[in-house]
Amino acid sequence: MSDYVIAPPPQAVLEVHGSQALFPVRRVYCIGRNYAAHAVEMGHDPDREPPFFFQKNPDCLDGSGHFPYPVMSEDVHHEAELLVALGIGGRDIAETTALEHVWGYGLALDMTRRDLQGAAKKMGRPWEIGKSFEHAAPVGPLYPVVEVGHPSEGALRLKVNGEIRQDGDLNQMIWKVPAMIAHLSRYYTLAAGDVILTGTPSGVGPVVRGDRLELTCAPFAPLRVEVT
């Protein structure tokens, strides 16, 4: 006899490069305006802001290679990001030891219903309606730290239909990965399975049905996504 009154929802998972094993996802934290040029293009001064985070739901992660254009929006934007997956959690993690908590890295797109996000901002409301919706985070496979180390520099580049839209470098992050982990752990009890999206360079812009997106950053395989 089942212990549940309804069937439990499926566990959100990420594929692991070169393995049949899967990485179970617990929570998804996303840092806002973590590249100076992107903060400026969004109308903010990056020098005056401490880090801040919002969340996507674990089931927003989608490794299918397809991004169905979402409902209730006419202005959906791409945001190219490095993804960090934690293998160890904790509270009040020191920045000097934070990388010891990382299991692996991957590539992701923080897709955003910009019109709905903008309306929420004007009314002082939360961003979830613009950030957390079905298929809102296309992702590639995870690469274990033992294979790729801790990438801290390298071109993070997004092409749309073969044209470069975003062209940044991981070393341009205002808050580096250890600082993000340390900061989050002061407000939340982090745990194995938590995922962090680390922010996007400048050049965010709209997508339409039929667009083909390609996100590259060595040493990862390209993340290719079609808007449907």
Image: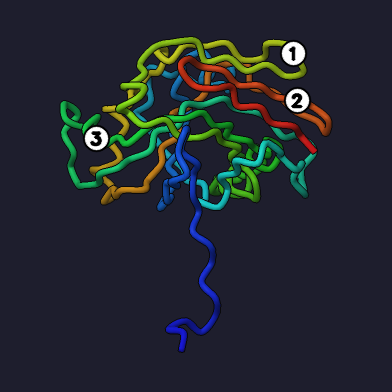
Q: Inspect the image, locate mark 2, and give the three-letter code of the amino acid beneath it.
A: Arg
For mark 1, what is the residue?
Answer: 162
Quarter-wise, where is residue 49 in the image? Answer: top left
Quarter-wise, where is residue 115 in the image? Answer: top right
Which quadrant of the rendered structure holds the C terminus? top right
Decide: is 224 above or below 171: below
Q: Residue at x 27, y 28 (%)?
A: 179
Alpha-carbon span between mark 1 and mark 2: 8 Å
Judged from the image, the secondary structure of the residue bearing numbered disc 3 is: helix
Judged from the image, the secondary structure of the residue bearing numbered disc 1 is: loop
Classed neighbour count for the residue bearing mark 3: other residues with Cα under 10 Å, few (<14), some (14–19), many (≥20):
many
Q: Could you say where residue 77 lies in the image, as x and y percent from the top left?
A: 68, 30
Q: Residue at x 49, y 59 (%)?
A: 11
Determine whether label 1 and label 3 are within 8 Å by CB: no
For mark 2, what is the residue?
Answer: 212
Alpha-carbon span between mark 1 and mark 3: 37 Å
Q: Inspect the image, locate mark 3, and give the three-letter code of the amino acid beneath it.
A: Ala
Alpha-carbon span between mark 3 and mark 2: 36 Å
Classed neighbour count for the residue bearing mark 1: other residues with Cα under 10 Å, few (<14), some (14–19), many (≥20):
few
Q: Specify whether 215 is left or right of 96.
A: right
Give the farthest residue toward the right. Answer: 210
Q: Could you say where residue 219 lies in the image, as x and y percent from the top left?
A: 46, 17
Q: Which of marks 1 and 2 is nearer the N terminus?
A: 1
Determine whether label 1 and label 2 are within 8 Å by CB: yes
Classed neighbour count for the residue bearing mark 2: other residues with Cα under 10 Å, few (<14), some (14–19), many (≥20):
some
The numbered disc on residue 182 is 3
